[in-house]
Amino acid sequence: MLKRTIVLLGFLFLINPFTQLKAGSPETTGLAFLKVGAGARGVGMGEAYSAVVTDASATYWNPAGLAAQEKSEFVFTHNKWLQEINNEFAAVSFHIKSHAFGISVMTQNIGGIERRTGPTEEPLGEFNAHNVMAGISYARYLAHNFAVGITAKFLYEKIYVEESAGAAVDIGVRYQTVVPGLTAGFALQNFGFVSELENESSKLPRMVRVGAAYLLPREVLQGKLIVATDVVQVFEGTSHVNLGAEYLLKNMFAFRIGYQTGYDDKDIHTGVGFYFSRYRLNYAFVPFSSDLGNSHRISVVIQL
């Protein structure tokens, strides 16, 4: 058993062929809030979540995860991000027989942007920027261990008085391998279009996620341990390797840690979770360098 566990951990963290991906060109996409992440549990695990997620936040990470959900669920996340930028995410998921559905909304608000028409000592005033994503998700099992899912998204952006809108889709796959406890995930995200903003067009942050997660077959000090990895490639930008782990003690307390490569200003992620019957409270903390500040996420999850 120990030998098999070591081999599987090696598969998750060392032998993944995508770990050889190198950073590409600087990011050249718009609507960057679509890359921020949703839900404190996944962020606390370093965003190594495409093969782990089975809650309502699967509408963001990998819609195929909705098929594995046992109960209907509602999740709300507040993200106090960098430089007074706030993100909100809410989603609800439910089943109708063998069909799983999800509805999600993500918003971002950036306030206090100085307005100038040229170099001046004082700004002419201030304005805000708003981003909105609203999505509908569907998932189901095609076989007892193979699920697929899709999310259709409406996108909206407003900066000062200029507006643009668009649409995109995410497609996901979740596979429970023949090895007990080992799951694989795959997701294509943000494939679509957005209209011009003040005669300027921008590309969506198209991404591919490839991940694996392993639930250790035996309890570790009366708790469950999950280790996971995701490789994320932004088509018009960089690639990242995400590593994460979660230790759940007596189905009541969760401790999480994660690490991301390929970023200049962040790497370590941490988080905790508290489980009370139908309710879960999750928190994630991500420190940033270069005087950018820190990110704090709080998620409330309710099983319906």
Image: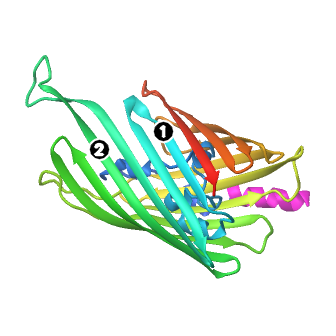
Q: Position of residue 175 (x, y in %)?
A: 66, 72
Position of 296 with respect to 8 (left or right) is left
Position of 236 with respect to 16 (left or right) is left
The amino acid beneath tag 1 is: Asn
* Residue 82 higher or lower than 177, as above or below: above
Residue 153: tell me if it is visible.
yes
Of residues 113 and 69, the one nearer the viewer is 69
Q: Position of residue 229 (x, y in %)?
A: 64, 55
* Residue 178 higher or lower than 250, as above or below: below
Residue 79, label in figure: 1
Look at the numbered discs 1 and 2 and tell me whether their residues touch, using CB distance below 8 Å.
Answer: no
Residue at 29 percent across and 51 percent down: it is 30
Q: Quadrant of residue 235?
A: bottom left
Bounds of the magenta segment: 1-13
Residue at 65 percent across and 67 percent down: it is 184
The amino acid beneath tag 2 is: His
Residue 130, label in figure: 2
Residue 173, label in figure: none
Residue projecting furthest to the bottom: 143
Position of 257 with respect to 153 (left or right) is right
Of residues 35 and 86, the one nearer the viewer is 86
Residue projecting furthest to the front: 304
Residue at 57 percent across and 49 percent down: it is 47
* Label 1: element kind: strand
Position of 291 with respect to 57 (left or right) is left
Residue projecting furthest to the top: 121
Q: Quadrant of the N terminus?
A: bottom right
